[in-house]
Amino acid sequence: MRDFLTELLTAYWFAPPVALWRAVELRTATKEMYRHPLLDLGCGDGLVAQALFGPAQVDVGLDPWAAQVRQAARSGVYRRVQQADGHRLPYPDGAFATVFSNSVLEHIPDVAPVVREVGRVLTPPDPGRGEPGGRFIFTVPSDAFRRLLHFYQARRAMGDEEGAERYAAEMDQWLVHHHYHTPQEWADLLAEGGMVLEKARYYIPEPVEHLWDRMNRRFGLGRRSLWGLLASPRLRGLGHQRLLARWVVHRFSRAWRPYYEMDVPPGEVGGGLLVVGRRAH
């Protein structure tokens, strides 16, 4: 198994909690099969796909933001990158055997048109050759994300229901999360796009989300902080950031190892959800 924790801490040393979440996410995603042609929907800067797939292993990377597309092009992960909106994918019907999307859909207020477009560009099944339809593999925060937050639970334990909801709303705003669908709700959305739900698997167990939430506060993510100042790209030339990066990798690749390797117990929920849909016809 790949050591995504060390890889992601190295890449995201400036935001260690992000590295933890992404590492668990990719440890979950790497268990799936990705047939080509492969589209990375909402590819961002390419760091996630680079960790998951390696150099030049993704046929197309797509993102709506020009700056992200430029970074993705420099990453060496994609054979082609393109700037476009997920609501109007610039590809013919049946163009991809797999569409992958990592922590993207929760940021789209109206996700149904995007899901329909994905269903359109996936390859249809070919019964004559015994080939199944293309697959849509994506990760999102789950329907349990809000209630598994450490500080949400802490406020509720003190009887502060209003404070708990306010904290969750602040997290939604900071993370730009618009929805947290259940597996059944994702199944319904996939059906609208001509797909069937093949799998819905929870990841990020409760102890991992608790740690992630506490570490966001410790490192001052989402607000002004000393760590944010020290890790700022504007101070890159001072030389101290190499020492910070080395400390982060050394400290947390060990301390967070049990959390990275933790799975959601059977029958329980986690803060993340991996969903696999397959084109039905």
Image: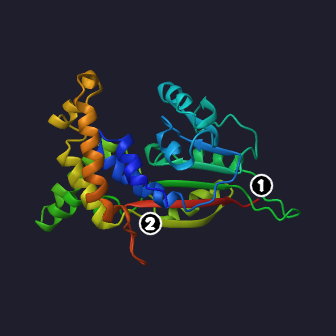
Residue placed most toward the observer, 62 or 54: 54
Which residue occupies the extreme left position in the image? 158
The colour scheme is: rainbow
In the displayed structure image, the side of residue 205 where residue 231 appears, left or right = left
Rendered location of residue 69, percent (x, y): 53, 29
Quarter holding the C terminus? bottom right
Rendered location of residue 55, percent (x, y): 58, 40
Question: Which mark identifies residue 177?
Answer: none
Which residue is located at x 37 percent, y 68 percent? 262
Say what amino acid the circle numbered 2 marks: Tyr
Which residue is located at x 76 percent, y 62 percent? 132
Rendered location of residue 72, percent (x, y): 53, 32
Which residue is located at x 76 percent, y 47 percent? 94
Q: Report which residue position mark 1 lands on.
A: 124
In the displayed structure image, the side of residue 175 where residue 82 appears, left or right = right
Residue placed most toward the observer, 105 or 225: 225
Q: Residues within 10 Å of mark 2 (few under 14, many from 20)?
A: many
The vertical placement of 228 against 207, above or below, is above
Residue placed most toward the observer, 33 or 87: 33
Residue 149 in view here: no
Residue placed most toward the observer, 117 or 129: 129
- In primary-sequence order, the first of circles 1 and 2 is 1
Judged by depth in the image, the label closer to the viewer, 1 or 2, is 2
Among the 4 quarters of the image, the one containing residue 12: top left
Residue 101 in view here: yes
Say what amino acid the circle numbered 1 marks: Pro
Which residue is located at x 41 percent, y 58 percent? 24
Q: Report which residue position mark 2 lands on.
A: 202
CB atoms at circles 1 and 2 under 8 Å apart?
Answer: no
